[in-house]
Amino acid sequence: MSLRSTVHAEIAAVAAEQEKRMPPITDGLVMLETEFDSLCFALLVARMEDLTGADPFSEMEADDLPVTVGDLVALYDRAAARKAA
C-alpha cells in the first residue's frame, strides 16, 4: 500500500470511528472544511507514527502546517525520505 493510500485509508478509518462525515478523500480536500476535528487529527498522527515510524510534526515550522490531504501526504513523504537517508 502506498503512503498516499495509507493516509487516505487512515483518515477514513478515524473519521468513521469518530462518527464524522467526510466528503470523498482526495489530495485537494481542505481538512478544515470537514468534520475532521483536532481529536481526529491527533488520532491520525499517532496512527501514522505507529505505521511509518516518523513524526514529521516534530521537525517542521508552523508555516508548513498541512492544509489539504495532499499537503499531509507530502509531509509524510518528506519525513519518510529523511528517515531513509
Image (cartoon, grey):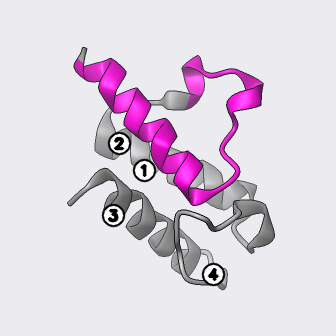
Dominant SS type (magenta): helix
Which residues make up the magenta segment? 57-84
In the picture of the structure, the residue carrying the numbered disc 1 is 47
Distance from disc 3 to disc 4, alpha carbons, whole Å, reads: 16 Å
| Residue 58, position as x, y percentages in the image | 57, 22
Q: Residue tagged by mark 2? A: 50
Q: Could you say where residue 76 lies in the image, as x and y percent from the top left?
A: 43, 39
Q: Earlier in the sequence, mark 3 or mark 2?
A: 3
Question: Do labels 3 and 1 touch, CB within 8 Å?
Answer: no
**Viewer-nearest of labels 4 and 1?**
4
Instruction: Judge depth for marks 2 and 4 and give the one in front.
Output: 4
Q: Are marks 1 and 2 in contact (CB under 8 Å)?
A: yes
> In the displayed structure, does residue 26 sit left or right of residue 82?
right
Q: Is residue 63 magenta?
A: yes
Q: Vertically, is 38 above or below 55?
A: below
Mark sitting earlier along the chain (2/4):
4
Specify the quadrant of the image occupied by residue 10.
bottom left
